[in-house]
């Protein structure tokens, strides 16, 4: 077993066209030109501010460009819709003031960050669908629609249960991804992490349960693909029952072919060897053939390499429950983790720890880095939103099977439980 960064993992079909290509540091000249033109176009539309402290970081803009196949007009429309949606639902206020217990109630229904990363340094999440039984979901949705858990106002059309879900996406983009970005024990340490890898366990789930969850999953996935594009790298579906080809027929129609190609449906014999191609054994939960002590509902079991970089403060020895995000301190040389949200009706602003910034020049060239001791709001999509306390910084997971491009109908020939003859992604025909 090696703890060093592993060999490069090729993208779907064995072609090296996935991460980090299309990301900062690995743009073609055409892609770089498109990014610059996109900034100019957004600035003309009043959606972007350039300068030493740009309103949005480059890695965020690139997510929208990749999602819309580098077509500026299409990326602009999705970006505009997302900005309007975030403003109408006060996503920053939601994340900053959400009740910690309500946040944790939502977190327990959706993918859990294991505290580990895949071989490329991308955060690894685990999702066990069987925990979303109809009674649990019904009780949760009823409570979500009848209980006010934050100071955020909404657009009136986005259900409260989904807004609480998107607090988890905010955690992905503001907490987990920035933390993993600063870890240099990976092949491309200068390239920001903007993705996630997911193990989705569908064992012990009946066809009826899948059917009962259909509307719930589709609503969450549609909004996630629209407003958190390109936050997904891979999904490994494990424990698929014999009828899963029927379920797959519903699910795949929510996504475009690129997203479908990121979904691996594994037979029992494929689980361990396939996961090990993407994830070191020490970071794979034991129930899937690895060495990691991690059960669903557990708090993150932090990677020892991450722990080595952390300087804990104020009595903390681990990350607390509830939302948190990172803010620059020490002139941009370090990032401080702030635990936010509300407990017993009182907002918290607790400094948990600091980590060193691996490449300060990356912060100043692509991110908002204004420093402040009291930070009220950070934006999950990197948008700058100043408050009376001054300033801001850049920044799930919701259903794991989301986060790709906006949906198109795709067709696929499926056969049997595994849906693939080899442990490769299910690709569009």
Image: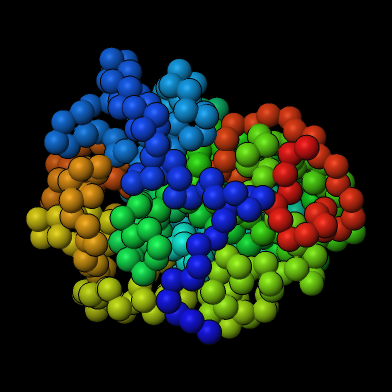
Give percent across and percent down for residue 65. Answer: 45, 31
Give percent across and percent down for residue 45. Answer: 32, 15
Q: How is the image coloured?
A: rainbow
If the image is split into quadrants, where does the C terminus sit?
top right
Relative side of 208 to 394, left or right? right
**For the point 30% across and 27% down, which residue is it?**
36
Give percent across and percent down for residue 426. Answer: 73, 48
- The extreme top residue here reads 44
- The extreme left residue here reads 331
**For the point 82% across and 53% down, which residue is it?**
419
* Quarter assignment of residue 238: bottom right
* Quarter assignment of residue 217: top right
Residue 216 in sight in this render = no
**For the point 63% across and 42% down, which residue is it?**
259
Give percent across and percent down for residue 47. Answer: 31, 23
* Quarter assignment of residue 285: bottom right
């Amino acid at each position: 077993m090696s703890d060093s960064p592993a060999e490069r993992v090729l993208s779907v079909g064995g072609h090296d066209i996935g991460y980090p290509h299309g990301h900062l540091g690995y743009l073609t000249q055409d892609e770089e030109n498109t990014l610059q033109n996109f900034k100019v176009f957004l600035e003309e539309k009043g959606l972007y501010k350039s300068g030493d402290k740009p309103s949005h970081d480059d890695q965020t803009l690139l997510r929208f460009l990749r999602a819309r196949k580098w077509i500026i007009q299409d990326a602009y429309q999705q970006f505009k819709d997302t900005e309007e949606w975030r403003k109408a639902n006060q996503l920053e206020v939601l994340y900053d003031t959400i009740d910690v217990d309500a946040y944790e109630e939502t977190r327990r229904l959706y993918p859990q960050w294991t505290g580990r990363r895949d071989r490329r340094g991308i955060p690894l999440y685990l999702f066990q669908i069987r925990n979303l039984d109809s009674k649990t979901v019904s009780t949760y949705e009823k409570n979500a629609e009848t209980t006010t858990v934050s100071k955020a106002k909404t657009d009136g059309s986005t259900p409260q249960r989904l807004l609480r879900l998107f607090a988890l996406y905010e955690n992905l983009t503001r907490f987990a991804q920035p933390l993993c970005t600063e870890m240099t024990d990976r092949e491309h340490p200068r390239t920001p992490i903007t993705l996630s890898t997911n193990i989705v366990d569908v064992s012990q789930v009946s066809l009826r349960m899948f059917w009962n969850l259909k509307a719930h999953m589709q609503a969450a996935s549609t909004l996630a693909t629209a407003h958190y594009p390109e936050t997904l790298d891979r999904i490994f579906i494990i424990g698929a029952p014999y009828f899963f080809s029927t379920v797959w027929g519903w699910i795949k129609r929510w996504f475009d072919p690129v997203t479908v190609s990121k979904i691996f449906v594994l037979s029992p014999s494929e689980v361990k060897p396939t996961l090990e191609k993407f994830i070191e054994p020490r970071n794979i939960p034991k129930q899937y053939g690895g060495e990691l002590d991690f059960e669903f509902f557990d708090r993150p079991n932090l990677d020892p390499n991450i722990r080595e970089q952390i300087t804990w403060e104020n009595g903390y020895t681990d990350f607390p429950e509830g939302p948190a995000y990172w803010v620059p301190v020490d002139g941009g040389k370090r990032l401080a983790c702030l635990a936010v949200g509300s407990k017993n009706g009182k907002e918290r602003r607790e400094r948990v720890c600091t980590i060193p910034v691996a490449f300060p020049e990356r912060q100043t060239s692509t991110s908002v880095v204004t420093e402040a001791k009291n930070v009220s709001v950070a934006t999950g999509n990197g948008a700058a939103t100043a408050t009376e306390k001054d300033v801001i910084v850049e920044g799930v997971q919701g259903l794991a099977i989301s986060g790709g491009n906006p949906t198109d109908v795709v067709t696929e020939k499926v056969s049997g439980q595994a849906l693939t003859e080899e442990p490769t992604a299910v690709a569009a025909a």
